Structure formats: structure tokens, C-alpha cells
Image: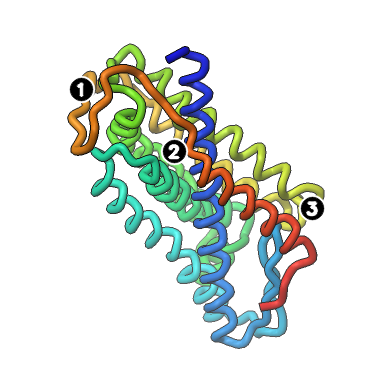
Amino acid sequence: MNLNKLTNCIVINSLTYFLLAYFVVAFSSNLFIILIAKLIGFDAVLSYNGFILTAGKWTNENIILIYFFGNLISLFLAVFFMRKYYINNRLRKKIKLLYLWIYIISLSWFFGEIIIGAIFQTGIGAALIAFEVPFFFRLLLSIICVAILVFLGIKTQHDVMYSANLYYPKLSVNKTGKYFVKQILLPALLGLLIIILLKLPNIGQYKFVDLYILLTILFFIIGVFYKYDKHKSFLFKNTEKNISTNECSITYLPIIILLVLIILFRVGLNNGISI
């Protein structure tokens, strides 16, 4: 297969599942927080930029319930889809890219909430303030979470490498870096750009905090690239049909689903809906 066509195919497939994973994580996180808030007396308006809570009473206990326990859903998603990926990582099913991206984005979302929240005093940061945690310790916690994201990225190298069995019969050491660029780096950067464009013109509505949280995925990606060349070459032995040459096909159903979600996200939530 032509190398440029192969590269484009890998990037398009991964970008599609990156954006699908983003919608799963973002909506699950927002809706779970809104559910908790509703249970303790708040009203909520959900829009394409996030959500606004009104009518409730902002006590320390409510802040902790909403922003600390509410954000645990992203950690649950990470663990659940990490397990799903481990079960499917040897199979040649592109749906496993969705599992891979959900657990990467979920981990980045959870620790990103801590990193950004602790500095900007929003979300989990507001809960930390309710616990009367001094700024120095909040800053220290942010630095620790950055290190955790990099470490998790390093531990994910093997998982990303094994996703290459969708396209190659073997992933040699000298091709691993290029594959990481096509499978992880380019889709993530293009996906972030698309998300930013979708949030215009009101992307600064929450002081860009949601954008900063998304950008913490770059710490994870740094970890994925850290000393990646220390791994051995992979000769894939799939439980399904093996491939003898480099091959790739674009999956169109996920693209159609993604386009529908984008329309619902940007048009359906343009003026916000009360929940």
C-alpha cells in the first residue's frame, strides 16, 4: 500500500475514534456531575461549552460532592475501558481504538481536572479549597499529577504499539516512532484543533479552563514517546485473520456517527438545554 495513503488512513481512523472518545468522556463527566448536583438541589443548563449550575446552595459539602466525587466518573471510565482494551488488544477490530482513546482521554481528564483546578481554583480545585488546602500544596499536587500523567503515558507504550496489529504484520523498532506520530500525536493535535473550532466563539466562557484541561493530554503523550525505542520489535500473532503486508481501510460508520454527534453537539446545544 502507498505509504502516504497508509499514513492518511491510520490518522483518519485514529482521529475519528479520538473525537468519539472525547464526546463519550466529556458528556459522561458533565452529565454525572449534573446528576449529583440535581440530587442536592441545583438546576443545570448544558451547552456545547459545558454546563452552568444555578439555584442551589454552595456549601463546602456540596462543592466536595459535585466537583470531587462528580469527577470520579472519568476515573471509572478509564479503568473500565482500559480493561476492555486489554481484552481486545490482540484482535484486529478497529473498535479497540475507541477503547484506547477513551481510557487515555479519561485519565488525562481526571488528572487534568486536578492539575488545572488546583491552580485556577475551579472544579476539583474548589473542592480542595473547601478542604482548606494551601496554594503551595495544591501546586505541589498539580506537579505530582503531571508526573503521574507522564508515567501513565510511559506505561501505555506497549498498548499503543500493539494497536499496530490493525495495519502491520510486524512493528519494528525503527518504525515505532513514526507509528506513534500517526496513531497518537497527529490525531490528538488535529482532534484538539477540531474541538477548539467547535467551541468557538465562546471558548473563553469559562476562562479557557476546559481547554487547559484538554491540553493536559499532551503530558500523557510525552510519556508515550519517552524512550519508546527501548522496546523490542513486535511480530503480531492475531486471533483473527493475519495480514502479510501493510494494509489499512477507513471505517466509515464511525465517521457518520461522529458527524451526527458533532451536529447534535454544536447545533442542538447551541442555546443550552435545561436539565
Secondary structure, mark 1, is strand
Q: Earlier in the sequence, mark 1 or mark 3?
A: 3
Along the line of sight, the residue nearer the viewer: 62 or 130: 62
Residue displayed at 37% across by 26% down:
226
Q: Position of residue 107 (x, y in %)?
A: 42, 50
Residue at (52, 40) in percent of width and height = 252
Label 1, label 3: how far apart the Cα atoms are: 48 Å
Report the side of 213 relative to 271 (left or right). Answer: left
Q: Label 3's element? A: loop
**Residue 275: x %, y % from top left:** 66, 78
Q: Which mark is residue 146?
A: none
Label 2 secondary element:
helix
**Please, what is the three-letter code of the amino acid marked with disc 2?**
Phe
- Read off the residue under disc 2: 220
Q: Nearer the viewer, mark 1 or mark 3?
A: 1
- The number of numbered badges drawn on the structure is 3
Above or below, 216 against 185 in this view is below
The amino acid marked with disc number 1 is Leu
The percent position of residue 222, horizontal first and vertical second, equals: 45, 31
| Label pair 3/2, CB-CB below 8 angstroms | no
Label 3 near label 1: C-beta < 8 Å? no
Tell me the quarter of the picture where residue 34 sits. bottom right
Tag 1 residue? 235
Q: Is residue 28 above or below residue 150?
A: below
Q: Which residue is mark 3?
A: 202
Q: Residue at x 38, y 62 (%)?
A: 76
Whether the residues at callouts 2 and 1 have beta carbons within 8 Å, the answer is: no
Task: Classify residue 247 as left or right of residue 118.
Answer: left
